[in-house]
Image (cartoon, grey):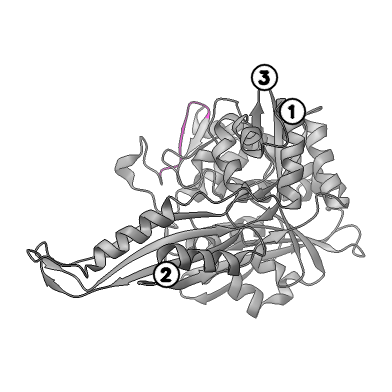
Amino acid sequence: MPEAELPEVAAIARDLIRFDTTNHGGGRAAGEREAAEYVGAYLETLGLKPEFYEPVPRRTNVMARVPGRNRDKPALVLHGHLDVVPAIADDWSVDPFAGVVKDGMLWGRGAVDMKDMDAMILTSVADLLRVGEQPERDLVLAFFADEENGGVEGSALVVRDRPDWFEGATEAISEVGGYSIPIGDRHAYLLQVGEKALVWIRLVARGRAAHGSKLHDENAVTRLAEAVAALGRTAWPVTLTDTSREMSERLAELTGQSAGDPDAVAAATGAASGFLRSTLRTTTNPTGLVAGYKHNVIPDRAEALIDVRTLPGTEDATLADIRRIVGDGVEVEIVHQDIGLEVPFSGDLVDAMVAALGRHDPGAPVVPYLMGGGTDNKALAALGIAGYGFAPLRLPSDLDFTGMFHGVDERVPIDALVFGQAVLTDLLRTY
């Protein structure tokens, strides 16, 4: 498809991808300012008045409020983040920040996480305002910085310093839900109604510095390696929450598997299985190692980063287990910790999201799930706002969509973006 013929939703997503908003974490980021200014300029073309908040230089957040027909109804927040995780260009088949269009898809870092949803939010609102319509209720459109670092320099500061942005809002919609997964020769949609808690930890092992040729039984690297291997290989048990139990039961009906074996049920969903199996248990994945400074010097300190995702409410118990697993000789430092979330798969908003999908893809079942990762919904929860993941995408069965999150050659079908825009427009018009 020539770029001049791109649907607007794909063109906006492409433009956003071309802003390199890489976030390395720990305050090391390119910054979202230019992307936020682009979003703000688009909102102005719709007659809205965007507000910007930049509590940390270049970490820019932008918001606009859209008046609804019924001001007595609570406002609905639609939010996205403008930062992306790093992409190593040599690993990709395209430039990850070029916004390449090929094979009917938009390629680039952020195509899935989550500049696609940012574009869907903007164009869905445009669908209404350009023809003189209003949404059913007030909408708060918010685009945050720093989500890929837990929102420390983004949504957390916005909620702390600008809670007025969300006045009157009780519910929110964001990423990682509403997309289709293959179930045999049919498909179903996953609607995200919960998120695991995030606990980023650092393991620190200490020993004695020495010459690399010595017989040495106090080697910090060895101690760390043993702890990392023990934790990384821990098989955490399946533990069902209300959401994951309902997910397993509904998927069991669709797959013909036994609901008593949630792992087998998840495995029957093909490429989505790895994503769904992680929602059934705690995960502890080593993600970084730091030790040593010369080949023939045994260092006295070694460190590892572990990405821990726990089921809501189990954070303290999990940390106690981790300390037991790594042993007394290794310190466990908490780098960042947030909360887990779980809201019911019921209520007017859930009914409206399911109905909107049904009008555009009749007969396709909708299944709740608890996401293994996290979103800025966690920050909004401090304001009493219940968050859902609903970025509706109808996807081809052979696309490993869940593998695109933070993956190589991230891409999204253009027709899926058009579908998502239509579903969101429908939802905003009716809910």
| Whether residue 279 is situated above or below residue 374 in the rendered picture | above
Q: Looking at the image, is mark 2 or mark 1 earlier in the sequence?
A: 2
- Specify the label residue 60 is tagged with: none
- Outermost top residue: 185
Q: Mark 1 — residue? A: 254
Report the amino acid beneath label 1. Leu
Q: Looking at the image, is mark 2 or mark 3 earlier in the sequence?
A: 2
Look at the image and say whether residue 50 sits in the magenta stretch: no
> Where does the magenta region start and end?
98-104
Report the amino acid beneath label 2. Gly
Report the amino acid beneath label 3. Asp
Q: Mark 2 — residue? A: 26
Name the mark nearer the viewer: 1 or 3.
1
Q: Position of residue 234 (x, y in %)?
A: 47, 52
| Whether residue 141 is situated above or below residue 16 in the rendered picture | below
Do the residues bearing badges 2 and 3 touch, measured as CB atoms within 8 Å? no
Out of 87 and 12, give the one closest to the viewer. 87
Q: Write the residue at 46% across / 68% down.
A: 323
Q: Residues within 10 Å of mark 1 (few under 14, many from 20)?
A: some
Q: Mark 3 — residue? A: 185
Q: Write the residue at 77% across / 57% down.
A: 343
Name the mark nearer the viewer: 2 or 1.
1
Out of 156 and 3, give the one closest to the viewer. 156
